Amino acid sequence: MRCFVAFVVVVVTSISPLVSAETIHLPGEMTLSGTILIAEAFYEQVKGEDEPVPLEFAAWPGSHGFRDADWFDVRIEAHPGDVIVLSAGTYPIALWVFTPGITITTEEAAEEQAIIHGTVEIDADRVTLDRIAVVGERMYGLSGHGIEVNREVIDRITIRNCRVEGNEWMGIHIIGPRGEITELRIEDCQVLNNGSFGIEAQSVGNLIITGCTITENSEGVHIGSYVENIKMHDNLIAGNRFADVFPKSEV
C-alpha cells in the first residue's frame, strides 16, 4: 500500500513506468480528516539544498493559488491506474486530487456510500468518482461547492453513482479560467438540495448526463458558455427552485 500521513517525508524524484496499479484501502490505520492531498510525489531534491523541498500544488485557497505539500494534513501517494477504496463512514475532509487516471470509490461490500463532508477538487485528467457522497456545508474556508472540476488540466472525467447533496453553493462546478473539457460524463447520480446550481457546465465539448436525479437545487443543470454537444436522457430533473435546465433552448 502506498499511503503517507502528514509529517512523513516521502522523496520521489522520478516515477518508473513499470509501477503496477494498486488498490489503496483507506483510512486503514490513519485518521482521515482535514486537508487531504492525492499526488504521485510530494518532495524533490533541489541542487544546493540539504533537505528535500516540498512540491507546490495549485490548490485553492492558497498564496497566489498554490500550496506546498507540507500544508496538507494527510498526503496519499497514488499513481495512474490506482484505485482508492474508502470504507463506509463520514469523513470531514477537503480533498485535492492531482494524480491522473485514478478511481476513487466506496468499498464494494458497503451498503452505504462513503461520505465526504467537504469539497472534492479534481485537478487531474481522467479521474473517476464512483459511489461517493459529497455533502454538507462549507468547511476549511473552502468554496462551498461539492465537486470542483478544473478545466485547465482535465480532458475527460466521469462521476457516477454519486450523491452530491446539501452543499452551500454548486453541487458539481467547473473551475479554472481557461481550457476546455472534451467530455464531462455524469451517470446515475443524485444531485440534491444544493444552494446554487446542481450541475454547472462551461467550456465542455461533450456534456453527458444520464440516469440522474437532480432536484431541489437553485437550478438543476446550468449550461454555460461554450458547451457544444449535450446528451441528457433518462434523468429526473424537476422541482428545482428557479429552473430545471437553463437555458431551456440548449437541450
Image (cartoon, rainbow, N blue to C red):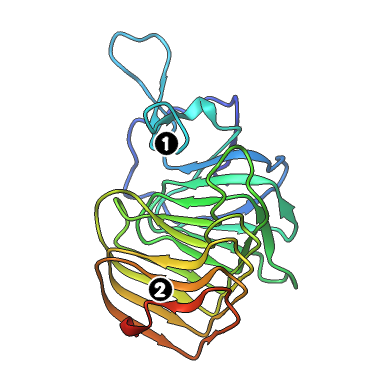
Disc 2 or disc 1, which is closer to the eye?
A: 2
Residue located 62% across and 38% down the image:
140
Query: Residue 135, position in %: x, y?
Result: 65, 59
Query: Residue 159, position in %: x, y?
Result: 48, 69
In this rendering, the answer to whether 247 lies above or below 12 is: below
Residue located 58% across and 26% down the image:
8
Tell me if mark 1 has few (under 14), some (14-19) or many (20+) residues whose alpha carbon lies within 10 angstroms of its own: many
Q: Amino acid at mark 1?
A: Ala
Among the 4 quarters of the image, the one containing residue 65: top left
Q: Amino acid at mark 2?
A: Arg
Among the 4 quarters of the image, the one containing residue 51: top left
Residue located 59% across and 61% down the image:
195
Between residues 99 and 229, which one lies in front from this camera angle?
229
Give the structural element (helix, strand or loop) at label 1: loop
Residues at circles 2 and 1 in contact by the CB criterion of under 8 Å: no
The earlier-in-sequence mark between 2 and 1 is 1
Which circle marks residue 185 in the picture?
A: 2
